[in-house]
Image (tube, rainbow, N blue to C red):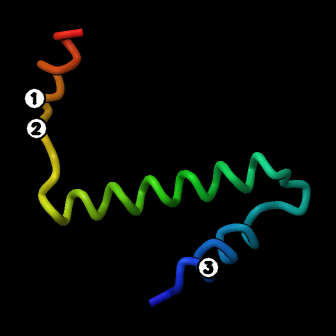
Amino acid sequence: METLKQEALNAISKLPDTADIDDIMYRLYVIDKVKKGKEAVEQGKVISVEELKRELNSW
């Protein structure tokens, strides 16, 4: 299993040489959110589409 540091370095190394700090930070942000989303699914911390629609309609 990759360490968090290695995962970050791999993600950064795939960016073009012209990438700026915002590109790097956005890539790391997206990776973090996807990883946390997968963990939430594995832990059953999800809601149904119907529940989501009800929440959105209550705004």
Nearest-to-viewer mark from 3 and 1: 3
Label 3: which secondary element: helix
Relative depth, front residue between 22 and 48: 22
At a point 69% along the width and 76% down the height, the residue shown is 9
Q: In this rendering, would 53 be left or right of 38?
A: left
Residue 5: numbered disc: 3
At a point 57% along the width and 52% down the height, the residue shown is 29
Q: Which residue is mark 1?
A: 51
Q: Quick check: 35 above or below 56? A: below
Question: Which tag, 3 or 1, sits closer to the chain's start?
Answer: 3
Q: Classify 10 Å Cα crowding around label 1: few (below 14), some (14-19), many (20 and above).
A: few
**Which quarter of the figure has residue 52?**
top left
Identity, as a three-letter code, of the amino acid under mark 1:
Glu
At a point 65% along the width and 49% down the height, the residue shown is 26
Q: In this rendering, would 50 be left or right of 14?
A: left
**Which quarter of the figure has residue 16?**
bottom right
Residue 48: numbered disc: 2
Q: Classify 10 Å Cα crowding around label 3: few (below 14), some (14-19), many (20 and above).
A: few
